[in-house]
Image (tube, rainbow, N blue to C red):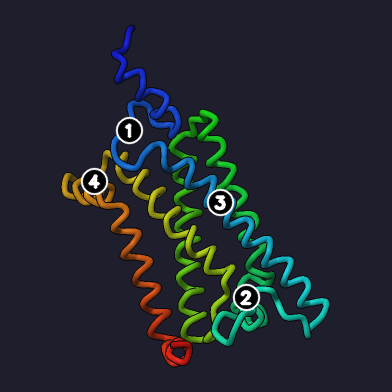
Amino acid sequence: MQHSPAEAAAEPAADLLGVPGASEDGPFPRMLPWLLLVGGAIGLGSAFTLTVEKIALLKDPAYVPSCSINPVLSCGSVMTTPQAEVFGFPNPLLGIGAFAVVATVGAALLAGARPGRWFWLGLQAGVTFGVVFVHWLIFQSLYVIGALCPYCMLVWTVTIPIFLYVTLHNLRRRPFLPAGGHRVVETMVGYHAVVVTVWFLGILTMIGVRFWSYWSTLL
């Protein structure tokens, strides 16, 4: 069976995300694999750096991490809290494993892999856990610990869009969604940059308000 040029051009894109018949409209499918690869690499680098800093701090309690810049941007203040070891080991170790998987998935998709539905559901579960955990850490950093870790903030920055775009990719291909649900998803896809921007602006506003007493002294 012969295909038109447009159909032939769309086929590699469909294969890229493992969804036969997928179209190239919206931010998919070319953006998602690169987001997973680049975002996963940034998250992996941040988690690895935090692990190295944590080891140095364990060796020498007087060690000042490279990301301890001022009273607010202070990795050292965060690393020594119970929140930094939620599961009984340093959180960055969890990040190393998780982001390595994310980056590998991105590379595999770019190489032409066609994962099945079960794979996308597993990835969805992972990124959902990640974004919930990240927002719990944001709350803890702002309102319990009272300090921010720059490398942790890099992890926040990549986790949010990874979650959003994986979720949109999965939702827009779920036939069980009602018509209204599909319209909402397609609207979010059409305005995906706005969604991400508003999300980040909300977090930046929280940071600005929480530490305004310090920021105001720098003005």
* Mark 2 vs mark 3, CA separation in Å: 20 Å
What's the residue type where badge 1 is placed?
Glu
Q: Residue furthest left?
A: 180
Image position of 114 (left or right of 174)? right
Q: Which secondary structure, mark 1?
A: loop
The image's mark for residue 209 is: none
The image's mark for residue 186 is: 4
Q: Disc 2 marks which residue?
A: 84
- Quarter of the figure with residue 20: top left
Q: Disc 3 marks which residue?
A: 40
Residue drawn at x 28%, y 58% as measured from the top left: 194
Packing grade of label 3 (10 A; few <14, some 14-19, many >=20) is many
Q: Quadrant of the C terminus?
A: bottom left
Q: Which one is in front in this view, the residue at disc 3 or the one at disc 4?
A: 3
In the image, residue 139 sits, relative to residue 158, either above or below, namely below
Image position of 188 (left or right of 135)? left
Q: Which secondary structure, mark 3?
A: helix
